[in-house]
Amino acid sequence: MSINIKGKVEAEMAQVGAEYVVKNIITTRKTGPPIFPKGEYGTAFNPDMKQDLPSWLTQQDLAYFVSKFKKTGFTGGLNYYRNLNKNWELTAPWSGAKIKVSVKFITGELDMVYTSLGMKDYIESGGFKEDVPGLEEVIIQPGVAHFNNQESPLDITNHIYDFITKNWELEAPYSGVKIKVPVRFITGELDMVYTSLGLKEYIHDALRRMYQIWSI
């Protein structure tokens, strides 16, 4: 199947329907890169898809995802892969750049990316740590595939909470430090963060005193 021919893959997906495609992708346990069969979508890259949904995916959730893709189609997602070469060109100036902020990496042992193209060896042999000096921890979730936040939401939430709590404590010595470089803060008036928990008042009052803000 040639993904680079715009409309070809979309037409083949349309033949089997959005529900089949979404269910096929979300529930896959097949490791390695997703490889589509040449000529037709068919069983896609999850030939062992079961009729019943796994315990972590409800029919209501699946129906919601399907309803969105029925409106938009799959072109947006497919275009990301069609644009990989251009993405490499655009990000070339940052080749070799190190990520130095704190990082916690979480993936499933059955994740199609983690099990593809030498990725597992890169992560576990030290190459990942070399490129990401701020890497604090690598979590490999047993029996979990690509959609780990869907499959194991409590575990993911706990890991994120622990990570934020730990780094919040590390930043405590800098509490009250002023940022004195010029700042322009941009948000939407309907933004869910801006309209939550007194943040609107904080931004228009305290934030101006703490930071040298040019405009909001």
Image (cartoon, rainbow, N blue to C red):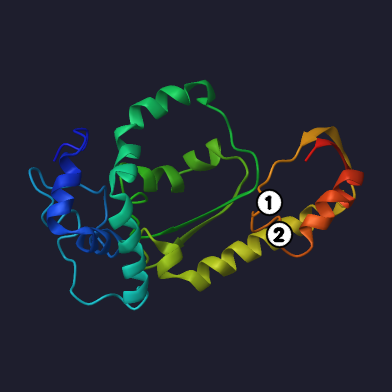
Q: Position of residue 86 (x, y in %)?
A: 37, 25
Q: Residues within 10 Å of mark 2 (few under 14, many from 20)?
A: few
Q: Find residue 196 and report its horizontal and vertical position in percent.
A: 71, 63
For the residues marked 1 and 2, what is the alpha-carbon distance in whole angstroms?
A: 7 Å
* Quadrant for the C terminus in the image: top right
Question: How many numbered marks, from 0 up?
Answer: 2
Residue hosting label 1: 189
Q: Label 2 amino acid?
A: Thr
Instruction: Tell me, for residue 1, which label it has, or none.
Output: none
Query: Do we see residue 58 in this rendering?
Result: no
Quadrant in which the N terminus appears: top left
Q: In the rendered view, would you say 29 is above or below 204? A: below
Q: Nearer the viewer, residue 52 or 111?
A: 52
Is 79 in front, or is 201? 201
Look at 67% across and 59% down and name the residue there.
164
Image quadrant where residue 180 sits = top right
Is mark 1 in CB contact (under 8 Å) with mark 2? yes
Q: Is residue 172 left or right of residue 156?
A: right
**In the displayed structure image, the side of residue 126 where residue 83 appears, left or right:** left
Residue at image point 64% right, 54% down: 191
The numbered dot on residue 195 is: 2
At label 1, the amino acid type is Glu
Q: Vertically, is 11 above or below 144?
A: above
Dot 2: element? loop
Left or right? Give the position of 195 relative to 107.
Answer: right
Q: Residues within 10 Å of mark 1 (few under 14, many from 20)?
A: few
